[in-house]
Image: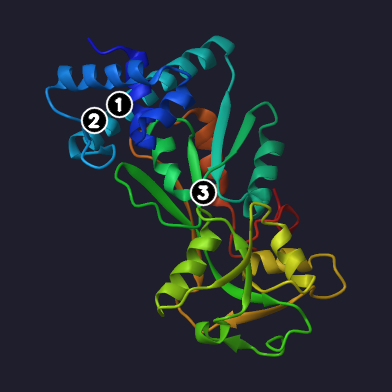
Amino acid sequence: MMELNSLKQFLVVARLEHLSRAADELHVAQPSLSRTVARLESELGVPLFDRSDRLRLNDMGKLFRDHVERALGELDAGRRAVARAASDGLGTVRLTSETFLTLTGPLAAYKRAHPTIEIQLHWSPADDMARRLRTQDVDLCVTSQRIHAEGLESVRLFDDAVGVGVPLDHPLATRTSVSIDELAGQPFITARKGHWLRGLLDRLFAARDLTPKIICETDEHSAIVDLIVAGLGIGLIPSAARRLAHRGAGGPPAAWIAVDSPDCRRTVTLYWGAGTRLSTAARLMRTTITGWDWTIDPGGHADDQPV
């Protein structure tokens, strides 16, 4: 009979595809972890990993992983449901996103309308969101990248143009638009891999067989505009972030130039698990986000809209 702990350990090995790193993360001995995987494979009657050059999850392993994630997610959801019933409250909502800048408005409105509900915010790269939804580690995801995974439902929130921000004294600062070819060789300040902004930059250049010249990649996304203003480089900036950067200021801190490419856009989407029994708190959050008037300000700033 499969043990709960063995299934949890399998998921870590499946995610990392590396026994020693998985053993370190789980704080168990590698031989013990190897025996756990072998025991699961023996019980299922099929190998879950290919072991030719390195450990790789095979098709049977991926199939088993998806079912294990859903099963453990349902178990955790059951525990939370019991806890909510015992406390007779609306509970907690868990939301993950690549950036919360565009969500400040609906989040503030939600908190004012439901002050007793606990809101847990998590940062996640887009490629980890499907797993977190399947395991019900989070209730809702908001992403600027399409999630290619089965078993999810979604609502498009808004579509936003992305331009390039340059210092005011930059040679391109007076331009109204610029091509990707003209940006080749320019020093870019951008986010680390996994963030939608970096993914868009890489795709735009790769489509033209070019590689962006990146001089700074940062986890501090709010610092990108500041570094551009300081004259250290240029960078892709969504139009919503440009408007928020101008709010309350005497003038624009940098020039924002349209990019001559129909692909230089982001589509912000809300995802949740198909068939997932969302808590009352999560359903209320979904209603608040999908009901927000994003046409007024895609930045989602609370000052622009009534509660």
Residue 114 horizontal side relative to residue 84, left or right: right
**Which of the 4 image quadrants contains residue 68?**
top left
Give the CA separation, mark 1 to mark 2: 6 Å
In the rendered image, which residue does mark 3 sit on? 142
Q: Secondary structure at mark 3?
A: strand
- Mark 3 vs 1, N-terminal side: 1
- Amino acid residing under circle 2: Phe
Estimate the x, y position of residue 303 in percent, counting from the top left: 76, 55
Q: Are marks 1 and 2 in contact (CB under 8 Å)?
A: yes
Residue 210 horizontal side relative to residue 213, left or right: left
Q: Residue at x 40, y 30 (%)?
A: 135
Mark 3 neighbour density, 10 Å: few (under 14) some (14–19) many (20 or more) = many
Give the CA separation, mark 3 to mark 2: 27 Å
Q: Nearer the viewer, residue 17 or 257?
A: 17
- Work out whether residue 238 can be spotted: no
Front tag of 3 and 1:
1
Q: Residue at x 63, y 33 (%)?
A: 119
Q: Which mark is residue 68?
A: 1
Estimate the x, y position of residue 230 in percent, counting from the top left: 80, 70
Estimate the x, y position of residue 242 in percent, counting from the top left: 69, 69
In the rendered image, which residue does mark 2 sit on? 64
Q: Which mark is residue 195?
A: none
- Amino acid residing under circle 1: Val
- Work out whether residue 69 can be spotted: yes
Mark 1 neighbour density, 10 Å: few (under 14) some (14–19) many (20 or more) = some
Front tag of 3 and 2:
2
Q: Secondary structure at mark 2?
A: helix
- Residue 125 to residue 284: above or below: below
- Mark 3 vs 2, N-terminal side: 2
Q: Residue at x 59, y 65 (%)?
A: 295
